[in-house]
Image: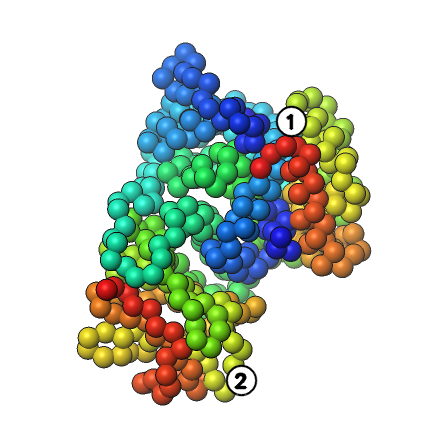
Amino acid sequence: MDVRAGGQPGSRRSKGPVGSAAPAGLEAALAAVARGDEAAFAVVYDRAAPAVLGTARRILRDPAQSEEVMQEVLLEVWRTASRFDPATGSAAAWITTLAHRRAVDRVRSEQRAARREIRAAAAAIAYDEVADAVEASLDRERVRRCLAGLTELQRESVTLAYYGGYSYREVALLLGVAVGTVKTRMRDGLIRLRDCLGVG
Amino acid sequence: MHALVGAYVLDAIPDRDRSEFERHLLTCEQCRDDVRGLREAGALLAAAVAVTPRPELRGPTLQAAGVTRQLAPVGGEPTRRSWRRREPSAGVVRFWLAGVAVSVAVVLAVTAVVLGLHMAAMQRRLAAEDRRDSAISAILGAHDTVVLTAAVTTGGTATVVMSHHERELVFTANGLTRLPGSRGYELWLSGPTGITPVGMLPPGSRGMSGPMVVGHVAVGDALEVTVEPVGGSPHPTSVPIVRLALDT
C-alpha cells in the first residue's frame, strides 16, 4: 500500500495516468472513486487491498473470514469514498482505519457470542511475525526498526492491540499490568512510532 | 494529550468508550490532530503486514462496486447561514461522521449479540435502536448538517447536530453536573404552539448524555433543558439551564 504518501510532502500527488485514464496515486484514485470512477477503484484495490487483507489476517487468523473482511472494506471504500476528507489524514490511513476497525469488531462480536478464550499464544507472535517476516518490504523494515526502538511494554501494548485485536483491558490482563498503564503505553508507543516513522 | 487517544487509534477501546471518545473529539481540536497523526503510524503498521490477495478475489470485488450505489458527499450543498451560533468546519462534521457511519451497522450487530438472551426483547430493542440510528444517520448524512453548541448555565455543554432539510436533530450534552438520584435532565421542544417534552436525557457515564433524536422541528423552535423529578414532568417546573434556538 502506498502509505508513505501519508506523511511525506510531495509524494501525496498522483503519479499521473499509467496506461489508462485512472490516476495511479492512492489519494488521487480515491478522489476519482468518489466521482464514481470504476477504473480508479481498481487502482485503489491494487494499492490498498494487501494492507487491508494483511491486517485482517493478523487479527482474525481465519483466511476465509479475512478475505471477506477485505472485500467488505474495499466495497465500503467504494461506497463512502465521497466522505473521505484529505484534511483528516492520508487515504491509506483512512482505509486501514476502516479495515482495522472492521476486523476488531468482528472479533468482538464473535467473542461476545462464544466468550472466546484469550489466545495467550498470540501475545508472543505479533511482534515476532513482523520481525521475522519472510517477505521483505520497505514498510516492513521501517516498522520493524521503529518497533524495536519502543520499550518492551510500549511495543507489546501497541502490537497486541493492533495485530492481536485486543482491547486495552485484555492487553492489561495479558501483560499483567494496570489498565491505566496500558493506555499510556499505547499512546506513548504510538507517538514514538509516529515520530520514528516520520509520519503524521 | 488525552490518555485514551492511543487506545482509540488502535481500536483497543470498548464500543461504549469509543463513542464517548468520538463525541469528545467533536469539541477537542487538539485530540483530532493527535488522532490524525497517530493514524498515519497505524497505516504503516498495516502496510508492514501486507499480503497479496488471491487474484480470484479482484474481479468479484470490482464487479460488486459496479452494482453498489455510492453515498453522496456531505456538505455538497451550501449550509443555511441563518442558524445561530458558530458553524464548525465541514471537516469537524465529517470527522465525526466517518466514525459514526462506520460504527452504526457494526454496533447494531454487536448490540444484538450482547443483549441477546431473550430473542424477542432483543429484536424489539434492535428495531428501536435501528430506528434511532437510521434517524441519526439521516441527519448526519443530510446535505445541510449544522452543529450548534451552547453552554449550560449549571455547567457543561449542549450540542445539537441538525438537518433543516430532514427537520430532525441529534441532541447530546457533556459535562453536565451530576444530579441527585431523584432529579434528572429533561429535554423540551419549544415552538409557537407551546412547549412539549422530548424526554429525559439518559444519564451517561463521564458526563456524556444522549444522543437523543428530535423530529419534526420547525423554524422558530428552540430546545430547552430543565431539571425535573426523575420521572419527568409534563410541563417544565424550573428555569431552563440551556436554550438552543433552532432558527433566527
Residue B124 position, x and y percent, is 41, 67
The amino acid on which the numbered mark 1 sits, given as a three-letter code, is: Asp
Task: Provide the secondary structure element on which disc 2 rests.
Answer: loop
Q: Is residue B221 left or right of residue B24?
A: left
**Residue at the image point whose x is 45% and y is 39% from the top:** A87
The amino acid on which the numbered mark 2 sits, given as a three-letter code, is: Pro
Q: Is residue B35 above or below residue B211?
A: above
**Residue at the image point whose x is 47% and y is 77% from the top:** B154
Identity of the residue furthest to the top in this view: A19
CA gap between label 1 and label 2 equals 55 Å
Q: Is residue B79 above or below residue A67?
A: below
Residue A131 position, x and y percent, is 75, 31
Q: Considering depth in this image, is B227 or A56 the residue closer to the camera?
A: B227
Tally of marks: 2
Image mark for residue B180: 2
**Residue at the image point whose x is 32% and y is 38% from the top:** B69
Q: Considering depth in this image, is B86 or A74 the residue closer to the camera?
A: B86
Location of mark 1 (residue)? A139
Q: Chain letter for mark 2, please.
A: B
Mark 1 crowd level (few <14, some 14–19, many ≥20, 10 Å Cα): many
Residue A182 position, x and y percent, is 72, 53
**Residue at the image point whose x is 57% and y is 46% from the top:** B34
Q: Considering depth in this image, is B100 or A197 the residue closer to the camera?
A: A197
Mark 2 crowd level (few <14, some 14–19, many ≥20, 10 Å Cα): few
